[in-house]
Image (cartoon, rainbow, N blue to C red):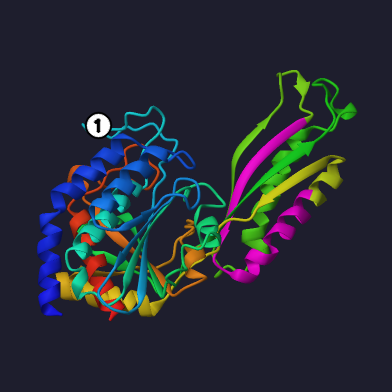
Amino acid sequence: MKELKTKIEQLAKKHTPAMIELRRTLHQNPEIAHEESETQKMIALRLKQARCTVKTNIWENAVLGLLKGHGKGKTIAIRSDMDALPVTEKTGYRFASKNPGKMHACGHDAHMAIVWGVAKILSEIKDELKGNVKFIYQPAEELPPGGSKFLIEKGVLEKPKVDMMFGVHVDPDIPVGKAGFYDGSMMAEPDDFTIEIIGKSGHAARPHETVDAVVVAANVVTALQNISSRQVDPVNPIVLTIGTINGGVATNIIAESVIMQGTVRMLDKNLARNIKSMIEKIIGGVCRTYGATYTFDFLKGYPNLVNDKRINDIFRKATADLYGKKAIYEIPDPVLGGEDFAHYAQKVPSAMFRLGIGNKQIGADKPWHHPQFKLDESAIPFAAALLAYGVVLGIE
Protein backbone atom coordinates (compact mmCIF):
# COMPACT_ATOMS: atom_id res chain seq x y z
CA MET A 1 0.00 0.00 0.00
CA LYS A 2 2.86 2.38 0.81
CA GLU A 3 4.35 1.77 -2.61
CA LEU A 4 1.01 2.55 -4.30
CA LYS A 5 0.65 5.73 -2.27
CA THR A 6 4.08 6.87 -3.43
CA LYS A 7 3.20 6.10 -7.07
CA ILE A 8 -0.02 8.08 -6.79
CA GLU A 9 1.82 11.07 -5.33
CA GLN A 10 4.35 10.95 -8.15
CA LEU A 11 1.68 10.58 -10.84
CA ALA A 12 -0.40 13.45 -9.44
CA LYS A 13 2.67 15.65 -9.65
CA LYS A 14 3.46 14.42 -13.16
CA HIS A 15 -0.05 15.19 -14.47
CA THR A 16 -0.50 18.51 -12.67
CA PRO A 17 0.32 20.69 -15.73
CA ALA A 18 -2.17 18.76 -17.88
CA MET A 19 -4.90 18.97 -15.22
CA ILE A 20 -4.45 22.73 -14.86
CA GLU A 21 -4.38 23.18 -18.63
CA LEU A 22 -7.67 21.25 -18.91
CA ARG A 23 -9.25 23.27 -16.11
CA ARG A 24 -8.31 26.53 -17.84
CA THR A 25 -9.53 25.37 -21.24
CA LEU A 26 -12.86 24.36 -19.71
CA HIS A 27 -13.02 27.67 -17.84
CA GLN A 28 -12.62 29.58 -21.10
CA ASN A 29 -15.40 27.60 -22.77
CA PRO A 30 -18.25 27.32 -20.24
CA GLU A 31 -21.57 25.77 -21.23
CA ILE A 32 -24.67 26.01 -19.05
CA ALA A 33 -27.05 23.19 -18.12
CA HIS A 34 -28.26 21.05 -21.05
CA GLU A 35 -25.83 22.78 -23.46
CA GLU A 36 -22.58 20.96 -22.55
CA SER A 37 -21.94 19.49 -26.03
CA GLU A 38 -18.40 20.82 -26.58
CA THR A 39 -17.53 19.98 -22.98
CA GLN A 40 -18.73 16.43 -23.64
CA LYS A 41 -16.44 16.08 -26.67
CA MET A 42 -13.45 17.38 -24.73
CA ILE A 43 -14.00 15.07 -21.75
CA ALA A 44 -14.71 12.00 -23.90
CA LEU A 45 -11.42 12.50 -25.77
CA ARG A 46 -9.45 12.93 -22.54
CA LEU A 47 -10.95 9.82 -20.96
CA LYS A 48 -10.06 7.78 -24.06
CA GLN A 49 -6.49 9.05 -23.69
CA ALA A 50 -6.63 7.72 -20.12
CA ARG A 51 -7.40 4.25 -21.53
CA CYS A 52 -11.02 4.26 -20.39
CA THR A 53 -13.92 2.68 -22.24
CA VAL A 54 -16.13 5.69 -23.00
CA LYS A 55 -19.86 6.09 -23.60
CA THR A 56 -21.54 9.35 -24.64
CA ASN A 57 -25.01 8.17 -25.67
CA ILE A 58 -26.40 7.80 -22.15
CA TRP A 59 -28.40 10.97 -21.53
CA GLU A 60 -27.94 14.41 -23.06
CA ASN A 61 -24.27 15.47 -22.81
CA ALA A 62 -23.16 13.00 -20.15
CA VAL A 63 -19.93 11.03 -20.43
CA LEU A 64 -19.27 7.68 -18.75
CA GLY A 65 -15.76 6.32 -18.52
CA LEU A 66 -14.93 2.83 -17.27
CA LEU A 67 -11.48 1.73 -16.17
CA LYS A 68 -11.15 -2.01 -15.53
CA GLY A 69 -8.56 -3.14 -13.05
CA HIS A 70 -6.83 -6.49 -12.75
CA GLY A 71 -9.13 -9.23 -11.47
CA LYS A 72 -12.48 -9.11 -9.71
CA GLY A 73 -13.32 -6.57 -7.05
CA LYS A 74 -15.53 -3.65 -6.13
CA THR A 75 -16.70 -0.98 -8.54
CA ILE A 76 -16.27 2.59 -7.37
CA ALA A 77 -17.81 5.56 -9.18
CA ILE A 78 -16.53 9.12 -9.11
CA ARG A 79 -18.84 11.88 -10.22
CA SER A 80 -18.04 15.25 -11.74
CA ASP A 81 -20.60 17.88 -12.66
CA MET A 82 -20.11 19.67 -16.01
CA ASP A 83 -22.34 22.72 -16.31
CA ALA A 84 -21.47 26.38 -15.91
CA LEU A 85 -23.71 29.22 -14.71
CA PRO A 86 -25.44 32.18 -16.43
CA VAL A 87 -22.99 34.61 -14.81
CA THR A 88 -20.89 37.36 -16.44
CA GLU A 89 -17.30 36.76 -15.37
CA LYS A 90 -15.32 39.50 -13.60
CA THR A 91 -12.26 37.58 -12.40
CA GLY A 92 -9.66 39.26 -14.58
CA TYR A 93 -8.27 35.81 -15.47
CA ARG A 94 -6.24 35.76 -18.69
CA PHE A 95 -8.17 32.56 -19.38
CA ALA A 96 -11.56 34.12 -18.57
CA SER A 97 -14.77 32.94 -20.24
CA LYS A 98 -15.04 33.46 -23.98
CA ASN A 99 -18.80 32.87 -23.85
CA PRO A 100 -20.63 36.09 -22.88
CA GLY A 101 -22.88 35.74 -19.83
CA LYS A 102 -21.60 32.26 -18.97
CA MET A 103 -19.01 31.32 -16.35
CA HIS A 104 -17.68 28.41 -14.35
CA ALA A 105 -18.46 30.21 -11.10
CA CYS A 106 -18.91 27.09 -8.97
CA GLY A 107 -15.75 25.14 -9.71
CA HIS A 108 -17.16 22.53 -12.05
CA ASP A 109 -14.22 23.21 -14.40
CA ALA A 110 -11.87 22.15 -11.58
CA HIS A 111 -14.02 19.11 -10.76
CA MET A 112 -13.79 17.88 -14.36
CA ALA A 113 -10.02 18.35 -14.44
CA ILE A 114 -9.57 16.62 -11.08
CA VAL A 115 -11.64 13.57 -12.03
CA TRP A 116 -9.80 13.29 -15.34
CA GLY A 117 -6.55 13.46 -13.36
CA VAL A 118 -7.78 10.55 -11.25
CA ALA A 119 -8.46 8.58 -14.44
CA LYS A 120 -4.93 9.28 -15.68
CA ILE A 121 -3.35 8.28 -12.37
CA LEU A 122 -5.34 5.08 -11.99
CA SER A 123 -4.85 4.09 -15.63
CA GLU A 124 -1.11 3.93 -14.95
CA ILE A 125 -1.54 1.63 -11.95
CA LYS A 126 -4.61 -0.29 -13.13
CA ASP A 127 -2.80 -3.64 -13.05
CA GLU A 128 -2.57 -3.16 -9.28
CA LEU A 129 -6.32 -2.48 -8.90
CA LYS A 130 -8.63 -5.40 -8.18
CA GLY A 131 -11.89 -3.82 -9.31
CA ASN A 132 -13.35 -1.16 -11.60
CA VAL A 133 -13.67 2.60 -11.55
CA LYS A 134 -16.46 4.54 -13.26
CA PHE A 135 -16.03 8.21 -14.09
CA ILE A 136 -19.45 9.84 -14.35
CA TYR A 137 -19.48 13.27 -15.98
CA GLN A 138 -22.92 14.62 -15.33
CA PRO A 139 -24.69 17.54 -17.02
CA ALA A 140 -27.21 19.93 -15.50
CA GLU A 141 -26.30 19.85 -11.82
CA GLU A 142 -27.20 23.52 -11.43
CA LEU A 143 -30.71 23.31 -12.84
CA PRO A 144 -33.39 21.33 -10.98
CA PRO A 145 -34.38 18.54 -11.22
CA GLY A 146 -30.68 17.99 -12.05
CA GLY A 147 -28.98 15.38 -14.18
CA SER A 148 -28.19 12.69 -11.62
CA LYS A 149 -31.78 11.45 -11.42
CA PHE A 150 -31.88 10.78 -15.15
CA LEU A 151 -28.45 9.17 -15.30
CA ILE A 152 -29.48 6.77 -12.54
CA GLU A 153 -32.61 5.92 -14.53
CA LYS A 154 -30.39 5.26 -17.57
CA GLY A 155 -28.36 2.74 -15.59
CA VAL A 156 -25.01 4.44 -14.83
CA LEU A 157 -24.89 2.64 -11.48
CA GLU A 158 -25.24 -0.78 -13.17
CA LYS A 159 -23.18 -3.04 -15.44
CA PRO A 160 -20.95 -3.24 -13.46
CA LYS A 161 -22.93 -2.45 -10.34
CA VAL A 162 -21.49 0.43 -8.33
CA ASP A 163 -20.59 -0.47 -4.74
CA MET A 164 -19.76 3.06 -3.56
CA MET A 165 -19.75 6.59 -4.92
CA PHE A 166 -17.28 9.43 -4.43
CA GLY A 167 -17.88 13.14 -4.96
CA VAL A 168 -15.85 16.31 -4.52
CA HIS A 169 -16.82 19.98 -4.44
CA VAL A 170 -14.55 22.98 -4.11
CA ASP A 171 -15.13 25.23 -1.10
CA PRO A 172 -13.66 28.75 -0.80
CA ASP A 173 -14.42 28.80 2.93
CA ILE A 174 -11.88 26.01 3.52
CA PRO A 175 -8.19 26.90 3.18
CA VAL A 176 -6.27 25.33 0.32
CA GLY A 177 -4.42 22.24 1.44
CA LYS A 178 -7.32 20.85 3.45
CA ALA A 179 -10.22 18.47 2.76
CA GLY A 180 -13.52 19.01 4.57
CA PHE A 181 -15.76 16.25 5.89
CA TYR A 182 -19.24 16.10 7.38
CA ASP A 183 -21.00 12.87 8.30
CA GLY A 184 -24.74 12.62 7.75
CA SER A 185 -27.02 15.31 6.35
CA MET A 186 -24.62 17.89 4.91
CA MET A 187 -26.78 19.78 2.39
CA ALA A 188 -30.44 20.70 2.16
CA GLU A 189 -33.36 19.80 -0.05
CA PRO A 190 -33.89 22.90 -2.22
CA ASP A 191 -37.45 23.26 -3.53
CA ASP A 192 -38.50 26.08 -5.89
CA PHE A 193 -41.91 27.62 -6.40
CA THR A 194 -43.82 30.21 -8.43
CA ILE A 195 -46.82 32.13 -7.08
CA GLU A 196 -49.16 34.31 -9.10
CA ILE A 197 -51.47 36.60 -7.17
CA ILE A 198 -54.53 37.55 -9.24
CA GLY A 199 -56.47 40.62 -8.21
CA LYS A 200 -58.71 43.15 -9.96
CA SER A 201 -57.22 46.13 -11.75
CA GLY A 202 -58.47 49.71 -11.74
CA HIS A 203 -57.50 53.36 -11.29
CA ALA A 204 -54.98 54.15 -8.58
CA ALA A 205 -57.31 56.87 -7.26
CA ARG A 206 -60.16 54.41 -6.68
CA PRO A 207 -58.58 51.46 -4.82
CA HIS A 208 -61.88 50.50 -3.19
CA GLU A 209 -63.10 49.29 -6.59
CA THR A 210 -60.12 46.96 -7.02
CA VAL A 211 -58.22 44.08 -5.49
CA ASP A 212 -54.61 45.29 -5.40
CA ALA A 213 -52.36 42.35 -6.29
CA VAL A 214 -49.30 44.25 -5.05
CA VAL A 215 -50.75 44.69 -1.56
CA VAL A 216 -51.82 41.04 -1.45
CA ALA A 217 -48.38 39.91 -2.64
CA ALA A 218 -46.67 42.04 -0.01
CA ASN A 219 -48.74 40.39 2.70
CA VAL A 220 -48.01 36.94 1.29
CA VAL A 221 -44.25 37.63 1.38
CA THR A 222 -44.46 38.74 5.01
CA ALA A 223 -46.77 35.91 6.08
CA LEU A 224 -44.57 33.23 4.53
CA GLN A 225 -41.76 34.16 6.90
CA ASN A 226 -43.97 32.90 9.74
CA ILE A 227 -43.22 29.36 8.59
CA SER A 228 -39.62 29.55 9.74
CA SER A 229 -40.22 31.86 12.71
CA ARG A 230 -43.44 30.38 14.15
CA GLN A 231 -44.33 27.03 12.56
CA VAL A 232 -41.01 25.15 12.61
CA ASP A 233 -38.92 24.16 15.61
CA PRO A 234 -36.21 26.86 15.79
CA VAL A 235 -33.46 24.25 16.09
CA ASN A 236 -34.55 22.78 12.72
CA PRO A 237 -32.85 24.76 9.91
CA ILE A 238 -35.10 26.18 7.19
CA VAL A 239 -34.90 29.20 4.94
CA LEU A 240 -37.61 30.56 2.65
CA THR A 241 -36.68 33.25 0.15
CA ILE A 242 -38.71 35.16 -2.41
CA GLY A 243 -36.11 35.82 -5.09
CA THR A 244 -38.15 37.63 -7.75
CA ILE A 245 -41.32 39.72 -7.71
CA ASN A 246 -42.90 41.34 -10.75
CA GLY A 247 -46.21 43.11 -11.20
CA GLY A 248 -47.98 46.20 -12.41
CA VAL A 249 -47.77 48.23 -15.59
CA ALA A 250 -47.97 51.91 -14.58
CA THR A 251 -47.86 54.23 -11.55
CA ASN A 252 -51.54 55.12 -11.79
CA ILE A 253 -52.92 51.61 -12.40
CA ILE A 254 -53.53 49.13 -9.60
CA ALA A 255 -51.88 45.88 -10.52
CA GLU A 256 -54.08 42.99 -11.54
CA SER A 257 -51.33 40.38 -11.24
CA VAL A 258 -48.06 39.83 -9.39
CA ILE A 259 -45.75 36.89 -10.06
CA MET A 260 -43.23 35.80 -7.43
CA GLN A 261 -40.59 33.11 -7.52
CA GLY A 262 -38.86 31.67 -4.50
CA THR A 263 -37.02 28.79 -2.89
CA VAL A 264 -37.36 26.92 0.38
CA ARG A 265 -34.56 24.79 1.82
CA MET A 266 -34.49 22.39 4.77
CA LEU A 267 -32.68 19.36 6.18
CA ASP A 268 -35.58 17.60 7.88
CA LYS A 269 -37.33 14.94 5.73
CA ASN A 270 -40.70 15.27 7.49
CA LEU A 271 -40.67 19.01 6.97
CA ALA A 272 -39.77 18.51 3.31
CA ARG A 273 -42.87 16.31 2.89
CA ASN A 274 -45.17 18.96 4.36
CA ILE A 275 -43.65 22.24 3.21
CA LYS A 276 -45.69 22.54 0.01
CA SER A 277 -49.03 22.40 1.87
CA MET A 278 -47.72 24.79 4.55
CA ILE A 279 -46.84 27.39 1.93
CA GLU A 280 -50.09 27.00 0.01
CA LYS A 281 -52.18 27.27 3.18
CA ILE A 282 -50.69 30.71 3.87
CA ILE A 283 -51.10 31.89 0.28
CA GLY A 284 -54.72 30.77 0.23
CA GLY A 285 -55.50 32.38 3.57
CA VAL A 286 -54.07 35.77 2.62
CA CYS A 287 -55.78 35.74 -0.78
CA ARG A 288 -59.16 34.92 0.75
CA THR A 289 -58.75 37.77 3.22
CA TYR A 290 -58.26 40.30 0.40
CA GLY A 291 -60.56 38.77 -2.20
CA ALA A 292 -57.77 37.67 -4.55
CA THR A 293 -57.09 34.32 -6.20
CA TYR A 294 -53.79 32.64 -6.95
CA THR A 295 -51.89 29.94 -8.78
CA PHE A 296 -49.10 27.98 -7.13
CA ASP A 297 -46.50 25.82 -8.90
CA PHE A 298 -44.09 23.85 -6.73
CA LEU A 299 -40.96 22.15 -8.08
CA LYS A 300 -39.54 19.46 -5.82
CA GLY A 301 -35.77 19.78 -5.76
CA TYR A 302 -32.93 17.43 -4.96
CA PRO A 303 -33.18 15.38 -1.76
CA ASN A 304 -30.90 16.43 1.07
CA LEU A 305 -27.37 15.11 0.72
CA VAL A 306 -26.52 12.49 3.35
CA ASN A 307 -22.85 11.49 3.53
CA ASP A 308 -22.01 7.93 4.56
CA LYS A 309 -19.50 8.01 7.42
CA ARG A 310 -17.83 4.84 6.15
CA ILE A 311 -16.96 6.59 2.88
CA ASN A 312 -15.85 9.75 4.67
CA ASP A 313 -13.58 7.62 6.85
CA ILE A 314 -11.87 6.26 3.75
CA PHE A 315 -11.05 9.81 2.78
CA ARG A 316 -10.06 10.83 6.28
CA LYS A 317 -7.48 8.02 6.20
CA ALA A 318 -6.39 8.93 2.68
CA THR A 319 -5.98 12.57 3.68
CA ALA A 320 -3.96 11.69 6.77
CA ASP A 321 -1.75 9.26 4.87
CA LEU A 322 -1.05 11.69 2.03
CA TYR A 323 -0.97 15.06 3.75
CA GLY A 324 -1.07 14.48 7.50
CA LYS A 325 -3.93 14.86 9.98
CA LYS A 326 -3.60 18.64 9.84
CA ALA A 327 -5.12 18.50 6.35
CA ILE A 328 -8.40 17.07 7.71
CA TYR A 329 -11.04 19.76 8.21
CA GLU A 330 -14.15 18.73 10.10
CA ILE A 331 -17.00 20.87 8.78
CA PRO A 332 -18.86 22.26 11.82
CA ASP A 333 -22.35 22.68 10.36
CA PRO A 334 -24.39 21.64 7.33
CA VAL A 335 -25.38 24.23 4.72
CA LEU A 336 -28.74 24.92 3.09
CA GLY A 337 -27.41 24.78 -0.43
CA GLY A 338 -28.53 21.91 -2.62
CA GLU A 339 -26.57 19.27 -4.53
CA ASP A 340 -28.00 16.64 -6.85
CA PHE A 341 -25.22 14.20 -5.88
CA ALA A 342 -27.84 13.41 -3.21
CA HIS A 343 -29.69 11.18 -5.69
CA TYR A 344 -26.67 8.88 -5.96
CA ALA A 345 -26.35 8.83 -2.16
CA GLN A 346 -29.89 7.47 -1.96
CA LYS A 347 -28.90 4.48 -4.10
CA VAL A 348 -25.38 3.48 -3.00
CA PRO A 349 -23.09 4.31 -0.06
CA SER A 350 -21.72 7.73 -1.00
CA ALA A 351 -19.96 10.80 0.29
CA MET A 352 -18.87 14.13 -1.08
CA PHE A 353 -15.92 15.87 0.51
CA ARG A 354 -15.26 19.59 0.34
CA LEU A 355 -12.00 20.62 -1.26
CA GLY A 356 -10.31 23.63 0.23
CA ILE A 357 -9.52 26.24 -2.44
CA GLY A 358 -9.47 29.33 -0.24
CA ASN A 359 -6.51 31.70 -0.62
CA LYS A 360 -7.25 35.35 0.08
CA GLN A 361 -3.90 36.50 -1.28
CA ILE A 362 -4.93 35.56 -4.82
CA GLY A 363 -8.60 36.55 -4.46
CA ALA A 364 -9.80 32.97 -3.98
CA ASP A 365 -12.22 33.99 -1.23
CA LYS A 366 -15.44 34.74 -3.10
CA PRO A 367 -18.50 32.53 -2.61
CA TRP A 368 -19.91 30.08 -5.11
CA HIS A 369 -21.78 31.71 -8.03
CA HIS A 370 -19.96 35.05 -7.57
CA PRO A 371 -18.71 36.75 -10.79
CA GLN A 372 -15.24 37.01 -9.22
CA PHE A 373 -15.12 33.37 -8.06
CA LYS A 374 -11.54 32.05 -8.18
CA LEU A 375 -9.72 29.03 -6.84
CA ASP A 376 -6.17 28.14 -5.84
CA GLU A 377 -5.14 25.65 -8.52
CA SER A 378 -2.76 23.83 -6.17
CA ALA A 379 -5.95 22.17 -4.88
CA ILE A 380 -6.33 20.30 -8.18
CA PRO A 381 -3.45 17.79 -7.83
CA PHE A 382 -4.17 17.64 -4.07
CA ALA A 383 -7.69 16.38 -4.81
CA ALA A 384 -6.68 14.10 -7.68
CA ALA A 385 -4.20 12.25 -5.47
CA LEU A 386 -6.71 12.09 -2.63
CA LEU A 387 -9.46 10.62 -4.82
CA ALA A 388 -7.09 8.16 -6.49
CA TYR A 389 -5.74 6.95 -3.16
CA GLY A 390 -9.31 6.81 -1.82
CA VAL A 391 -10.13 4.42 -4.67
CA VAL A 392 -7.16 2.23 -3.75
CA LEU A 393 -8.29 2.10 -0.11
CA GLY A 394 -11.96 1.58 -0.95
CA ILE A 395 -11.57 -1.01 -3.67
CA GLU A 396 -9.58 -3.45 -1.49
Classify the position of the C terminus by image quarter: bottom left
- Magenta residues (range): 257-283
Q: Residue furthest right?
A: 209
Image position of 125 (left or right of 66): left
Q: Is residue 205 above or below residue 259?
A: above
Indicate the position of residue 276 as horizontal and vertical percent values.
70, 58
Residue 213 occupies which quadrant of the picture? top right
Q: Is residue 105 in view from this perspective?
A: no
Q: Is 61 rendered above or below residue 333? A: above
Q: Which residue is painted at 24% across and 60% down in the image?
A: 118
**On the rendered image, what quadrant is the N terminus found in?**
bottom left
The residue under label 1 is 92
Q: Is residue 313 left or right of residue 153?
A: left
Quick check: can you spot residue 100?
yes
Q: Position of residue 318 (x, y in %)?
A: 22, 74
In which quadrant of the rendered view does residue 295 lie? top right
Label 1 sits on a secondary structure element that is: loop
Residue at 71% in and 18% down: 250
Q: Residue at (75%, 53%) from the top-left corner?
A: 280
* Magenta-span inclusion, residue 271: yes
Identify the residue at image location x=79%, y=29%: 256
Name the quadrant containing residue 302. bottom right
| Percent of width and height locating residue 86 | 45, 36
In this view, the residue in front, 52 or 77, is 52
As shown in the figure, which amino acid type bears the numbered disc 1?
Gly
